[in-house]
Amino acid sequence: MDRAWPRSSWAVPVLLVIAACTDAASATDLHPEGPPMIEQVRLVEIYSIGTGQRLERVVFGFGTHPMASSDDEHPVTTAKAASNMLRIIMDELLRGNNLEEIQCRAKVDDDDFARVPLGATPDDIARCSAAQDVLPSLCPGSNRLSVCICQNDGGCMTGTTLTPKGQSVGVLDRDQDGAADNTRFIDGVVAIVCGSIDAPLDAPLVVPLDLEMSYWTPSGDQQAPAQGGFDALGPAVVVVPHAALPTSMACGVAFSPEVVDKDGNRVCAPPGGDITKACVPGDTSAFKFTVEPLGFAIGQAIMDPGQPRTADIKLKANVPLDPGSLANITVTEASATTYTQWTAMLDPLDASQIIIHWTAPGGLAATTRYTITLATTVTDAYHQPGPQPFAIAFTTGAS
């Protein structure tokens, strides 16, 4: 799908006209009356089918769909902690200007992305994509619909050209098609917020988002197409965590007051995603999910008995870990003797993998039983503990 800014948002009037031309409710209708409502949220959950095998699937964690089964839609209590994403499906269009920004040719403040003013059209983007020498005349800063305006007191460097504050540095348009080459989600306009499972999310932990992977798509409706299925429903805000979600926590979503529909109404979540029911603009508390707990597994095969005495032990978590918490790992030798000739570190390429290295000359003692224990004080990157300690035991080989 082409997500370039000037292309995705201009079909809005057509969609609204189509929706207004029929009184019969259908899966292709949008609902512009009242506040914009969250109709469904799709996310990945972890589940098993009785074998203990860790499986995953994308489900409706909020809202329903007439084509979905009970396996497809239910409250999520074990959301996948790592590599998850939330597809927040709306019942009407939002102002894309307040959700995504376009890339400029140079830094305009602390980065090279800038917002598009309300009312700007593809023609405004095109005139601000012109050659550098004609930008002052075609895309003057005095025009409120001009984009990529320099905000820095000392000006903005575009290659070897200094653009004064208040003038446009130009839209990044390498293919010269008159459209922005790249868009990015605006930081802070939508957030995944998490807090205690037993309390309201009144002092939440805010999960950083991947602004390059998160996006707004004004396309789609409630009709699941053959290609894409439920994951093509829309219009939708798709938010992707920068890393992982905090384990064992209750989470929800929050929208900035600037995220509104064409009438200036804020987003809300009706009970169960039922858009026939009322919700207070700005209140999205009806949607919550719980993240799976912190878990560990053996990262590579361990021989028991016969484990090589100098071989590192690798333990794999389901999320990145707090490196400072590795001090809470213990190793015992034989029945209960504390063993100290070892170090623990996170894999430089994988912060969810612990490497335990034996430092004694020759490694561990021969034909001896060792136990490695990860206390609940070994935590994820958000300092969230596991539900119980994790331990493995093995006996070393004779040589």
Image: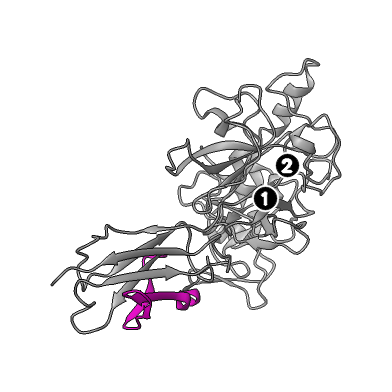
**Residue density around tag 1, few if under 14, some if 14–19, many if 20 or more, within 10 Å:** many
Relative to 155, is 184 above or below? above
- Side of 243 where 395 appears, left or right: left
Is residue 30 shown above or below 98?
above
Which image quarter: residue 149? bottom right
Q: Is residue 347 magenta?
A: yes
Residue matched to label 2: 94
Query: How is the rendered protein coloured?
Result: one colour
Look at the image and give the residue range highlighted in magenta: 324-352
Helix, strand or loop at label 1? It is: loop
- The quadrant the C terminus occupies is bottom left
Residue type pointed to by label 2: Leu
- Report how far apart the C-alphas of labels 1 and 2 lie in the structure: 8 Å
The amino acid type, in three-letter code, at marker 1 is: Leu
Please state the horizontal and vertical placement of residue 241, each as a whole percent of the image: 56, 55
Please name whichever residue, 78 or 187, is drawn nearer the observer in this view of the structure. 78
Residue under label 1? 99
- The answer to the question of whether label 1 and label 2 lie on touching residues, with beta carbons closer than 8 A, is yes
Q: Going by the picture, which residue comes out furthest to the left?
A: 399
User: Is there any visible trace of residue 116 in the rendered image?
Assistant: no
Residue in the picture at 35% in, 69% down: 371
Q: In this orientation, which residue lies closer to the viewer: 282 or 61? A: 61
Quadrant of the image occupied by residue 154: bottom right
Mark closer to the chain start, 1 or 2: 2
Image coordinates for residue 266, horizontal then vertical, percent: 81, 46
Residue 81 shown in magenta: no
Label 2 Cα neighbours within 10 Å, binned few <14 / some 14-19 / many ≥20: many
Estimate the x, y position of residue 373 in percent, counting from the top left.
Answer: 42, 69
Q: Is residue 156 above or below residue 388?
A: below
Q: Nearer the viewer, residue 8 or 302?
A: 302
